[in-house]
Amino acid sequence: MTAPAVEGDTRTAPMLLVADPDAGLVRQLSAAMQDAGVDVTGVPDGAQALLQAGALQPDAVLICASLPIVGPLDFVRAVRLMRPVPVLLGIDFGSDAEQALQALEAGATACVARPYRVPELLPLVQAAFRRQDGHRTVLTIGDVELDVTAYQVKVGGRLVHLPLREFELLHYLMRNADRTVTREQIMRNVWHSNDGMSTNTNTIAVHVKRLRARLGDVEDTVIQTVRGVGYRLVSG
């Protein structure tokens, strides 16, 4: 467990706040994440999670979908009023579907499997840590505005909820606006596939199709398909 942050403290490692009533699971995750260079604080319920989210200013928060006292929906709504921080929702497959959907609609960043897996959590926490530099990073292209720090996307001023993978895909395309990026580059930089081949290209096409629909890109003029190569986001 990590000690509370103090004013003027310069953080050198990512900090993850974990709220889960299963103390054994939290201890196991804490040890594994600390071995990976992430400071972890664990709390058993949503009320304590809210207090520590304000006191510690973590880079990311992981909450259980069955969080007691203050549930995941109320927690997400409350923490969004305090500061923009990624909130990850741990769900048991086959259950918690309704809570997960409500939390995502309220602004949770992503759902992750419970029991937790370090390879799934570590990239999300490390990416959040890199963004917490005291400045908001906002990319704007046409009517699309992407706030990297708050994990928010607006189209024509209207807030649009994107699942984490689609958010990362849009972020990558916006950073490379007017340039054609290959499917292999997308695999490496969005799906984090080192060999560039572990993600089926049809998966990318499905995510691009969904992203276009959410952006209102009905004629594929914003995200263009470069046949046989990849995709290009047009800034004009």
Image (tube, rainbow, N blue to C red):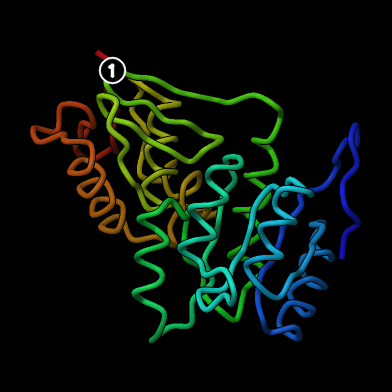
Question: Residue at 34% across / 19% down in the picture?
Answer: 141
Residue 40 rendering spot, x and y as whole percentages: 79, 62
Q: Secondary structure at mark 1?
A: loop
| 182 sits to left or right of 191 | left
Question: Residue at 82% across / 47% down in the picture?
Answer: 13
Question: Residue at 37% across / 53% down in the picture?
Answer: 163
Residue 228: name its quadrant.
Answer: top left
In front here: 33 or 119?
33
Question: Residue at 45% across / 63% down in the picture?
Answer: 73
Residue 140: name its quadrant.
Answer: top left
Q: Where the C terminus falls, by quadrant?
A: top left
In front here: 182 or 124?
124
Residue 46 rendering spot, x and y as whole percentages: 62, 67
In front here: 113 or 85?
85
Residue 101 rendering spot, x and y as whole percentages: 35, 66
Most extreme residue toward the left is: 219
Residue 225: name its quadrant.
Answer: top left
Q: Where the N terminus falls, by quadrant?
A: bottom right
Q: Is residue 197 above or below residue 114?
A: above
* Number of numbered callouts drawn: 1
Disc 1 crowd rating (10 Å Cα; few below 14, some 14-19, many 20+) is few
| 112 sits to left or right of 161 | right
In front here: 20 or 162?
20
Q: Is residue 216 above or below residue 45?
A: above
| 25 sits to left or right of 101 | right
For badge 1, the amino acid type reads Gly
The residue indicated by pointer 1 is 142
Q: Is residue 109 above or below residue 63?
A: above
